[in-house]
Amino acid sequence: MQILADDIGGTNTRLALYQGSTGVQLDLLLAETYPSQSYDSIEAVLQGFLTHPSARVIDRVCFGIAGPVIDQVCETTNTVLLASTVMASPLPW
């Protein structure tokens, strides 16, 4: 099972991809940090990260976002990066 963990902040967006199974410690496959202010959407950051050969089928995703959620949209602090409960474009999983 592959798990994508995403820490989205006003300064940096940190992405990590783990491999694991139930009851077993996770193995880190890939970790990257992107400057949040260099991207106009979370989808843009994810698309670059997910082109890596280690990113196959993502089974689980967890987003941690610094900012308030209003009407199912979260605007990060210190930048205009937006996250919605419904992504603007489909992701490859």
Image: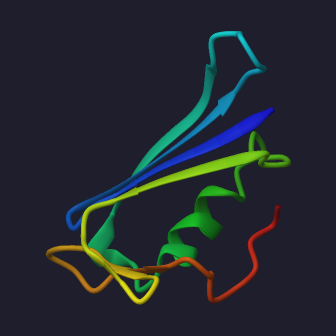
Indicate the quadrant where residue 59 lies: top right
91 relative to 48 in the view: left or right: right
Residue at image position (51%, 68%) is 45
Residue 73 picture location, percent across and down: 42, 84
26 relative to 82 in the view: left or right: right
Residue 31 picture location, percent across and down: 50, 38
41 relative to 46 in the view: left or right: left
Residue at the extreme front = 71
Residue at image position (46%, 45%) is 32
Residue at image position (63%, 89%) is 88
Residue 44 picture location, percent across and down: 54, 77
Q: Quadrant of the C terminus?
A: bottom right
Q: Nearer the viewer, residue 90 or 84?
A: 84
Q: Nearer the viewer, residue 86 or 52?
A: 86
Q: Nearer the viewer, residue 6 or 11?
A: 6
59 relative to 71 in the view: left or right: right
Q: Nearer the viewer, residue 79 or 31?
A: 79
Q: Indicate whether 75 appears above or below 31.
A: below
Q: Indicate whether 3 appears above or below 36.
A: above
Q: Quadrant of the N terminus?
A: top right
Residue at the extreme left = 78
Indicate the quadrant where residue 43 lies: bottom right
Q: Indicate whether 25 appears above or below 8.
A: above
Residue at the extreme top = 24
